[in-house]
Image (spheres, helix red, strand yellow):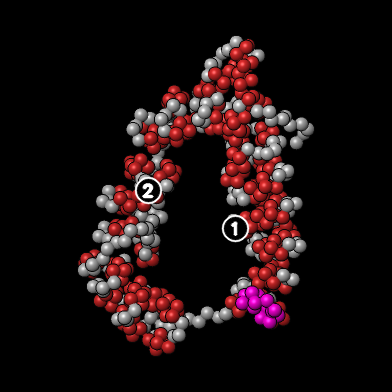
Amino acid sequence: MGENDDQLAQVAFGVSEATEAARDRARRLLEADTALHTEWIAGLVANQSAPDEILRRVFTLEPLPDGVRRWLQFSELPPAAVKAAVTYANPDVRKDLARNQFLPADGLAVLTEDPDPEVRWFSVMMAREYNVQLPTELTVRLATGPEARIRMHAIELPGLPDETRLSLAEDPHPRVRAHAIDSWSWPRLRPEVRAAAQADSDLRVREAAERAAHIVMPLPTTLADFLVEPDERRRQDAAYHAPVDADLAVHLVAHEDSSLRRGAVWNPHVPTALALTLATDPEPSIRFALSLRAMSEEQRSAIDYTVPEGRYGAPAWVQERFGDPDALREISASSHVLLRRAVTCAPALPADVIEMLAADEDYFVRLMLCENDHAPHDLLIEMYADWKGLSWGMLADRRNFTRPGLARFADDSNYRLRLAALSDPQATPELVERLSHDPNDIVRCRAASDPRLPHARLVELLGSDLMPCTAAGNPALPAPLMHQLLDIAGVQQCTGAE
């Protein structure tokens, strides 16, 4: 009996010293609590300071606890966990692992050749979806292997040699052939392969060949061409985007179809003076679109517009001026709230523009300034404490969210500011311990995971009803105690050299 046994007594009873009888009772009590074991195991596998041996021990369990399964699927994993998980006996666990977007390329490479077909399938899908660079020889094996659905998705793997990709246009399976024929491959295919695709017995292949061979005609830009254009979608596209001539611009602005008038308003090739004739258009969406064009504030004031709810991207003309400090100053003083919001998206802002936007009367101008890393510290704190959106926590990652000094909020009535106090690198262990008793779950959990948490409190939390998993994940937890928790949970020791 020794220090570790006293720690177990503390886990079980909340006391730091105990008699030998109490220690024995503590061990028996803890050994019987399988729900607590599950919490410890889930915390230990996510513990950034857990030695490889801890992870190897966890992967001897069958089945794995649900908490470990979730961790495998959604978290960044240490190399030892990847090495253990890719060979885990249960294919459902390996499938969970294959779905993890953070899985290193070497781990995903192993899973693409897994014995289980579903694991292979998910792995190739993830490699394609997240543009994972696999070894070239592996991409070739996948693209030429026996499974059609693997070959089909291997077409888009980065690093697949061109000759292999082109060869798939002659694949025995029609779905693979159809997937391999696109605008990139079509001009590179041999003439006889193109001819075969156009005459293929499978409709999907013929349609792919037709799309790949299709030549996109330019949109009509003159009134005469517009009037004879039979495709309604191309007429709409021309109204919104084409470099229309003067006659077509006049025709669009006066058109009875409101969607074409709206297109003319958005089209930068329609002169502003002509577009302004729609300042009193009966359609509100047209007046709103007009209000976002580049024009003088006097011209804008003549438009009766209402800003609909929702978020809007910065107009192209504003983006074009992002590198012009004088233009940014002018736009940030606009009466149009969406233009002021758009300015906040500029990669760099002059100090006086930041000051102006930080004091803007519009809440979302100030919020967007924070979201784009321009805001001063005080505004970031204000929005971090107040913003009701799901992304409020991300504001703490902004450049100017200065952490030293945040401990001053440890007793604030707003739980978010108490949470921020734990970000202060100068926060004392005593403050962290106090916040581990906080009435708010998020604050308590963050404090329980803080390596500055006093050891006695950390050990006590291992036996709590609320945060044993978080405490087991605390990087300050000593490795011997980690092993002792697994011993109590009945997890076997690993044998043999790695």
Q: Which residues are magenta?
A: 196-208
Q: Earlier in the sequence, mark 2 or mark 1?
A: 1
Image quarter (top left, top right, bottom left or bottom right) of the N terminus? top right
In the image, 319 versus 106, the foreground residue is 106
At a point 61% along the width and 23% down the height, the residue shown is 30
| 243 part of magenta stretch | no
| 203 part of magenta stretch | yes
Q: Is 376 located above or below residue 55 in the figure?
A: below
- Element assignment for label 2: helix
- Per the image, the residue denoted by label 1 is 129
Mark toward the viewer: 2 or 1: 1
Residue 35 in the image, given as x and y percentages of width and height: 59, 31
Residue 29 in the image, given as x and y percentages of width and height: 61, 21
- Per the image, the residue denoted by label 2 is 370
The crowding category of the residue bearing disc 2, from other C-alpha atoms within 10 Å (few below 14, some 14 to 19, many at least 20), is many
* Location of residue 309 by image quarter: bottom left
At a point 26% along the width and 57% down the height, the residue shown is 333
Q: Amino acid at mark 2?
A: Cys
The crowding category of the residue bearing disc 1, from other C-alpha atoms within 10 Å (few below 14, some 14 to 19, many at least 20), is few
What is the C-alpha distance between the residues marked 2 and 1?
A: 31 Å
Residue 84 in the image, given as x and y percentages of width and height: 70, 41
Q: Would you say the residues marked 2 and 1 are in contact, meaning their CB atoms lie under 8 Å apart?
A: no
At a point 41% along the width and 55% down the height, the residue shown is 347
Report whether residue 381 is seen.
no
